Amino acid sequence: MVTPKLRFPEFKGGWVEKTLGEVSSDGMYGLNAAAKDFDGINKYIRITDIDETSNKFVPNPLCSPEGDLDPKFLLKENELVFARTGASTGKSYLYDKKDGKLYFAGFLIKFHINKANPKFVFYNTLKSHYSNWVKVMSIRSGQPGINAEEYKRFQFKLPTLSEQEKIALFLSTVDKKIDFIEKKRDLWKTYKKGIIYQIFNQKLRFKDENGQNFPNWNEKSLFSIADIYGGGTPSTEKSDYWNGSINWFTPSEVGKDKYVDSSNRKISENGLKNSSAKLLPPGTILISSRATIGQMSILKSEGSTNQGFQSLIVNENHSNEFIYYLCHILKRELIHRASGSTFLEISKNEVGNIKIKVPTLSEQIIIANFLSSIDVKIEKIVKELEIIREFKKGLLQQIFC
C-alpha cells in the first residue's frame, strides 16, 4: 500500500494496486465496418477520431458506420476505449454522452468500468507511467499492438471510491478550464480567418492617417513582388554536411507558427556550398511546395531548406508580413497549379506567375500590423493553454501513485 505525494487532507490510508481487468468487465473489440458520410444520427469513432492532446472525440471527419448496426457496439457511459494497434496504440477515450450516439470501430477495444470511478481510471491513462507501460507492452515483431487480455493486465493504484470521486471531480474542473481556453483560441482563429477573407477580398478597407481612402489595389505577379528560390539537396558524401549551425528546414517544420527560427537539423557552411539551396535571410517566406503544399512560415533568422519549398524574398516595395498573410488565401491556387506523376509539386514558375492584387505599401503595413495584433492575441492564449496543460500533467504525477 502506498500514498500519493499530493493529497486532499481528509483522506488517510494507503492505495492498493489493481488491474484494469479487476475494475471492469471483459474487453470487447469494435465494429468492423467501413465509414460513410454522416447520416445525421449515428457517429463512428475510429483511432484517428481520438485527439492526440485532449483524448476527446474530435471527428476527422465526422462519419457513420456502414451496414446493419448492432447495439452492442454502441458506447455507453462509464465505458473506456483503447487503440489496440499501430502507432497510436494506447490512445484512450472515455465516452461522454455529449458525443451522442457513438459506435466504436474495430481497431478499438472497449472496457466497461464498473468497480471504480471511470474518470479516475481514465486519468491514469494520461500519466507517464501508462505511456511507459504501453511502450513496453506493445513491442512486437512488426506492427505494435496491445490486445484485450494484455490491456486487462495494466496495473495502477486505487484509493477508496470517495477519494477517487473527489480526485476525478477536481481534475474535471481543470479540464473545463482547458476547454474554455481552447474555445477562446478557436474563436479567435475563426475571427482571424474571416477577417483575412474580408480584407483580401476588399470588403473591409482601412483609412490613411488623414482618414482618407487608400488608392485602389493593383494586380501584380508574385515574380514582380519577390525573388523566388527553391530548396536543395547537398551532397551527403561530405562528412561535415550536418555538423553546422545553419537552420535547415523541411516541410513538416513549417506552417505551425508564423515565425520559425529553429530546425531539427543544422547544415554546415561547406554542406550548403555543395548544395543548390540558398542561404535565405530573415524575413523570407517559406512556402511548402510538396506534400503539404501551401504551408508557410516566416524565417526569423538565416536559414535554408530542402527541395520541398519555393521561398519568397519580398522586395523593399512590399511588406513581407503582408505578403505572408496574403499567401494564406492562395493555398487552393497553389494546389491547383501543382503537378507530377509520383507526387504533386508546384514549380517556381507556377508560383511566380500567380496574379494577386496588392495595395500601397502604407496600407500593406497597416493591414499586416492589424493581423499581427490578432496573432499576438492567439499566441498569448496558446501560451496560457500550454501552461495549464503542463499544470495538469504535474498534478497527474503528484495526485496519483
Image (spheres, grey):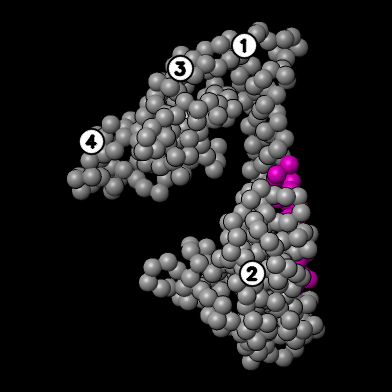
The residue lying at 50 percent from left, 27 percent from top is: 336
- How far apart are the two marked residues, 1 and 4, measured between alpha carbons? 42 Å
Q: Is residue 108 above or below residue 317?
A: below
- Image coords of residue 58 (percent x, y): 66, 54
Q: Nearer the viewer, mark 3 or mark 4?
A: 3
- How far apart are the two marked residues, 3 and 4, measured between alpha carbons? 29 Å
- Badge 3: few (under 14), some or many (20 or more) residues near its Cα, within 10 Å? few
Per the rendering, the mark at residue 217 is 1
Q: Which residue is mark 3?
A: 353
What type is the residue that disc 2 sits on? Answer: Val
The disc, 3 or 1, on the residue closer to the chain's N-terminal end is 1
Q: Quadrant of the C terminus?
A: bottom right
Residue contact at pointers 2 and 1, CB within 8 angstroms: no
- Image coords of residue 312 (percent x, y): 44, 25
Q: Which residue is mark 4?
A: 274
**Residues drawn in magenta:** 168-187
The residue lying at 68 percent from left, 90 percent from top is: 14
Q: Which residue is mark 2?
A: 81
What type is the residue that disc 1 sits on? Answer: Trp
